[in-house]
């Protein structure tokens, strides 16, 4: 057993000499450009909405601003040839994407929590599980030893499942208690958009950083599509519910005024 561990350690410490590196092609660069532009435009729109919104609605737009803003920086880095390194198999690996996810995915959960009216402790727990998932996926991607890579992937899935459960069940039960049909409908839309899109990330990882079956360009295109939907579309869905974004107290006050 000790010899096996020593062998694994030696393999993990011995870098593989790469004569050529599989890098992103023109299709991938086009996807990065599209992603950068879409996220940048959405960020500007969110800043404008935040500037003109009242304090109650502004918190939602601030979240969306930083969700798209951080992702814009990430895409600019990747488009500029920064934020990457070579991993096992001599494949280009964009670690800038993981920095993006580590910040933006918790912000998406925070936004969902604000819409649902979720308590801080539960929100913090879900955010913590999500951050551990991103760390595990990153560690799996840069792992040299295959066995270690798949252990990290299993750790990531183990953290991902409670996140999905919380968004689909716990947060939804909380928003229902608000007895606000518009907010319940909004939460249902953005929560399921998030759950469906996030479920594709581990699948793409599996065949990209995992088995290396997808080309780097295909990987970039897939991640870009998911990022645009889970961030830009998500943000504009928040904007579309502008009239309903507010505290239950405000809604009740408005109702009494109309009566």
Image (cartoon, grey):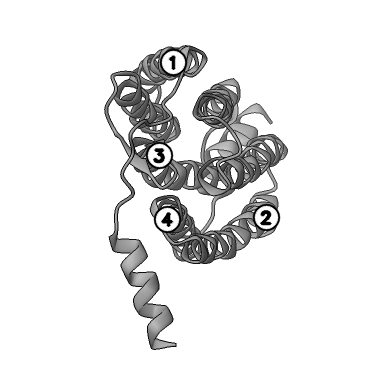
Earlier in the chain: of badge 1 and badge 3, it is 1
Residue 138 sits above or below residue 145 on the image: above
Earlier in the chain: of badge 3 and badge 4, it is 3
Q: Badge 3 is on which residue?
A: 90
> Residue 103 in the image: x percent, y percent?
37, 43
Q: Badge 1 is on which residue?
A: 29
Q: Are marks 4 and 2 in contact (CB under 8 Å)?
A: no
Q: Badge 4 is on which residue?
A: 131
Query: From the viewer's perspective, is 257 left or right of 68?
Result: right
Q: Which quadrant is the N terminus positioned in?
A: bottom left
Q: Badge 2 is on which residue?
A: 177
Query: From the viewer's perspective, is 132 left or right of 27?
Result: left
Question: Which of the two discs, 1 and 3, sits closer to the camera?
Answer: 3
Identify the element where label 3 is drawn.
Answer: loop
- Distance, label 3 to label 4, CA atoms, is 27 Å
Q: Which quadrant is the C terminus positioned in?
A: top right
Rate crowding at label 2 as few (under 14), some (14 to 19) or many (20 or more) other CA atoms within 10 Å: few
């Amino acid at each position: 057993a000790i010899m096996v561990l020593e062998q694994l350690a030696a393999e993990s410490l011995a870098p593989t000499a790469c004569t050529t590196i599989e890098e992103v092609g023109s299709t991938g660069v086009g996807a990065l450009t599209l992603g950068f532009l879409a996220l940048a435009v959405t960020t500007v729109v969110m800043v404008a909405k935040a500037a003109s919104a009242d304090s109650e609605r502004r918190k939602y737009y601030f979240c969306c601003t930083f969700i798209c803003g951080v992702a814009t920086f990430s895409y600019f880095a990747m488009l500029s040839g920064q934020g990457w390194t070579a991993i096992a198999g001599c494949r280009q690996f964009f670690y800038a994407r993981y920095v993006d996810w580590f910040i933006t995915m918790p912000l998406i959960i925070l936004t969902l929590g604000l819409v649902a009216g979720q308590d801080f402790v539960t929100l913090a727990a879900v955010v913590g599980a999500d951050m551990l998932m991103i760390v595990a996926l990153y560690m799996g991607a840069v792992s040299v030893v295959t066995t270690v890579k798949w252990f990290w992937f299993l750790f990531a899935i183990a953290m991902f499942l409670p996140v999905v459960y919380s968004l689909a069940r716990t947060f939804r039960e909380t928003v229902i208690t608000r007895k606000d049909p518009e907010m319940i409908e909004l939460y249902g839309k953005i929560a399921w958009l998030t759950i469906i899109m996030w479920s594709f990330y581990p699948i793409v990882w599996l065949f990209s950083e995992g088995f290396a079956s997808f080309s780097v360009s295909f990987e970039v295109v897939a991640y870009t599509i998911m990022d645009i939907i889970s961030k830009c579309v998500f943000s504009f869905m928040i904007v579309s519910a502008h009239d309903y974004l507010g505290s239950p107290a405000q809604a009740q006050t408005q109702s009494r005024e109309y009566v």
